[in-house]
């Protein structure tokens, strides 16, 4: 279970402390267990800082604390503080990554059976889509719906989201798509064959948590080959 350590300190020598942290990062490369480190400054007190360290588990945090480099840097950090820092150890009991949940829900909704439901709760009204092979971006929710309806008319399909990685306002999804060709697709008549492809989509999320922009990369050439569209070229 994820473990978080919160260090609360006051210092008028933050620049020196920041350089000290850079030294620790360099000296513990390949040995440290910390997965994520965030330092925040109090808006109402410029000398008040909070450092948040995330570890895969309590055991990994203790292993990190026992590194000789950690002990040495800690002693130097205390010397830079105006008063003794305080530590709070937290076991994470809930971790909501809201943007990744929105992306996962989007893939579920666009592949759902029946009529395509409203997308207002998932996408911004002026969502912009970047598709491989398209000369112009798809702009606006109405245009996105028409693009989705084209795919849904041509295939019964589903997505398997293999990975979701979030950073800042971006979420990257690596997915596997499978479908049954049931309708005309780019002039290729349906023949019921099973097809599949892999792809990656990077979404930008707006301040309201909705999807605001998307960049798609997928194996369209491989899909066309599976549909037999390249047979004449291979002869």
Image (cartoon, rainbow, N blue to C red):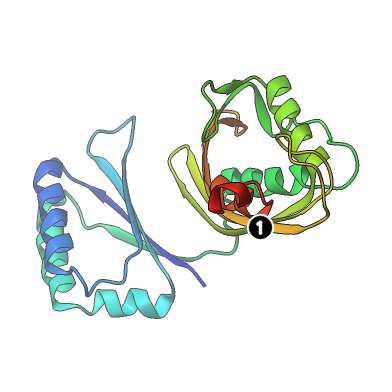
Residue 98, quarter of the rendered image = top right
* Label 1, residues with CA under 10 Å away: few <14, some 14-19, many ≥20: some
Side of 145 relative to 38 (left or right): right
Give the vertical position of 149 relative to 230 (above or below).
above
Image coordinates for residue 103, horizontal then vertical, percent = 62, 45
Q: Position of residue 112 (x, y in %)?
A: 82, 47
x 25%, y 71%: residue: 32
| Horizontal relation, residue 229 to residue 121: left or right | left
Horizontal side of residue 36 vs 202, given as left or right? left
**Vertically, is 102 above or below 74?**
above
* Of the pair 21 and 44, the residue shown nearer to us: 21
Position of 7 with respect to 178 (left or right) is: left
Estimate the x, y position of residue 183 in percent, counting from the top left: 83, 42
Along the viewing direction, whichever of 216 and 189 lies nearer the viewer:
189
Find residue 186 and report its image quarter: top right
Q: Residue at x 73, y 32 (%)?
A: 121
Residue 84, image x, y percentages = 21, 58
For label 1, the residue is 196
Report the label total. Answer: 1
The quadrant the C terminus occupies is bottom right
Residue furthest right as drawn: 114
Task: Tell me if I can see residue 120 in this picture.
Answer: no
Q: In the structure shown, which secondary structural element does the residue marked by tag 1 occupy? A: strand
Q: Residue at x 14, y 78 (%)?
A: 68
| Image: 31 above or below 198 | below
Q: Nearer the viewer, residue 167 or 110?
A: 110
């Amino acid at each position: 279970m994820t473990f978080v350590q919160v260090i609360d300190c006051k210092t008028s020598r933050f620049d020196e402390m920041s350089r000290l942290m850079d030294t620790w990062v360099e000296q513990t490369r390949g040995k440290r267990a910390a997965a994520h480190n965030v330092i925040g400054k109090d808006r109402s007190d410029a000398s008040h800082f909070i450092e948040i360290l995330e570890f895969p588990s309590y055991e990994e945090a203790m292993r990190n604390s026992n590194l000789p480099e950690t002990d040495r840097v800690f002693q130097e950090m205390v010397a830079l503080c105006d008063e003794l820092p305080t530590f709070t150890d937290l076991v994470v009991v809930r971790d909501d990554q809201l943007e990744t949940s929105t992306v996962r829900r989007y893939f579920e909704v666009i592949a759902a059976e029946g009529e395509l439901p409203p997308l207002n709760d998932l996408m911004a009204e002026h969502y912009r889509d970047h598709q491989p092979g398209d000369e112009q971006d798809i702009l606006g929710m109405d245009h996105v719906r028409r693009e989705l309806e084209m795919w849904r008319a041509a295939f019964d399909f589903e997505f398997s989201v293999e990975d979701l990685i979030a950073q800042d306002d971006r979420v990257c999804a690596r997915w596997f798509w499978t479908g049954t060709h049931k309708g005309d697709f780019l002039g290729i008549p349906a023949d019921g064959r099973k097809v599949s492809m892999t792809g990656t989509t990077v979404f930008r999320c707006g301040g309201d948590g909705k999807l605001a922009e998307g960049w798609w990369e997928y194996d369209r050439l491989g899909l066309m080959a599976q549909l037999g569209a390249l047979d004449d070229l291979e002869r």
